[in-house]
Image (spheres, rainbow, N blue to C red):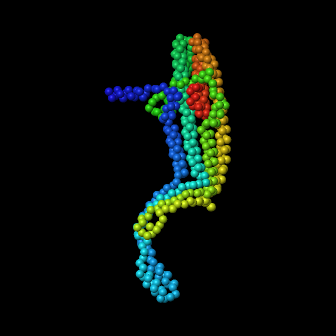
Amino acid sequence: MKKLFWFLSVCSLLISQELSFNNAWQLVLENNHALKAGKIAVQKSEKLNEANTMLYLPKIDLSASYAYLGDPVSLDAGMALKEAGKNLSSAGLQGVVNQIADRLTPLELSNQNVVMASVKILYPLYAGGAIKAANELGKLALKDSKEALRLKTLSTFEQLAGIYYGVVLNQEMLKTLQEVENGHKLHLENAKKLQQAGQIAKIEVLSAQVAYNRAKNDTLKAKDSLEVAQLALQTILSDTKSDYTPNSKLVIKSNSKAPSLQKLLARTLDSYPLLNQVKIKEEQAQEALKLARSKFIPHFALFGSYTYHRHDSILGSSMPSWYVGVGMSMPLLDNTGSYQKFQASKIAQLEVSQIKAQAIKDISLLVEKTYKEALQAKEFYFVLDSSITLAEENLKLQEQAFKQGMGTSTKVVDARNLLSKAKIEQQSVAYKYILSIAKLMALSDQTQNFKQYQ
């Protein structure tokens, strides 16, 4: 019973499951490790952004200490009085002072055990705009991580389109080559019959045999390519246990319309994550300049402290328990290169503006280039329809001529190969069209509209 259950489980894993592109995309969104890492990076940026808001709150420190002194802290009044008496001019008066001093005993101000605990508060009132700039930089870093995740998602979408439809292309090429192999096999059988009937020479049979052998080799190569493509699909789906078979077709509908170039270009320039990241870097450069400028502006802060002393000594009871105040700090000479960093921040703004201008040009060129490639592929796809029709008619004529002894085996082989070449070329053109549309949808962040062009 256990063996039967194991056998059925293995069979269920080996059964190929049909998979649409939309379902494949959902699997990638759920399982892709790179996208998961991007989401984790966003969560990290959110926490760092929350940490920056803490700069508006006061800093509160609690400290405690215990010290054991080598000798108690004391005040020897007698010794001090004797030292003062030495300066007196009258010897009799010095003697009186010394007698009084001898009767005085040292006064213990603190014993050897000193225990202290304090709470200190530092509340920034004004930091030259540094706190606000730091918070803005945190928000921009969070935006940048979100745009990085969007960029990774769109590039993964484009990657999936190439892999998924690569499997479809290999499936259709294998099917075409299998048809060619079957055709060459049938042609070889007919050639052998005609040779036996004495209607053709042996060389015609050999020509058909060579063509059939080549067709078998091409079919084997196509099977290997399909297996590699399917492995790539399983990898991007992050599922190596299931065997998926794409159920899409590489067909371009004659009534399908490509999206408007101007709308695609406008939407891409407005929403493409890479351009948004450049804009974010531009804003970051502005905030970094404010942060650098804050180094030259006075900083004001409110400070206070409450200290606990063990009041079992004169010194402990005489010290104040708390104090508050307002402080100001401003660097006069800074050895950390603040001025040079300020200048570098101003130069960074110019650098980012140039990067932004170049990025807009590059993305615009990429959209226009991809759009033209899609239109050319679509046009060429339908041009190949007539080539396929002509190749089919030519194959029929050559096969009939060969059966009637008026044609050669080479012409039949060439006609069949010409037909397969036209079909494979059309399938490849359809593949290029699909990839161009997928790239345009990714660039303009319209992946949800891709199904209209599949």
Q: Position of residue 450 (x, y in %)?
A: 57, 28
- Residue 244 x %, y %: 48, 28
Q: Is residue 12 above or below residue 126?
A: above
Q: Is residue 145 above or below residue 370?
A: below
In the orientation shown, which residue stands out farthest toward the bottom? 91
Quadrant holding the N terminus:
top left
Give the answer, above or below, for where 376 lies relative to 43: above
**Can residue 89 be seen at all in this image of the molecule?**
yes
Any part of residue 407 in sight: no
Residue 429 x/y as whole percent: 60, 26
Task: Judge from the rendering whether residue 435 lies leftward or rightward of residue 243; answer left or right.
Answer: right
Q: Residue at x 66, y 39 (%)?
A: 360
User: Which of 145 and 307 lies nearest the eye of the viewer?
Assistant: 307
Question: In the rendered image, which quarter contains the C terminus?
Answer: top right
Q: Residue at x 59, y 60 (%)?
A: 329
Q: Is residue 342 above or below residue 241?
A: below
Q: Please name the residue shown 48% across and 86% down the image.
A: 94
Q: Quadrant of residue 117?
A: bottom left
- The residue closer to the viewer here, 68 or 60, is 60
Q: Is residue 37 left or right of residue 262?
A: left
Report the number of numbered marks.
0
Picture coordinates of residue 208, whole percent (x, y): 55, 19
Front residue of this view, candidates 272 and 69: 69
**Residue at position x 53%, y 44% from top?**
45
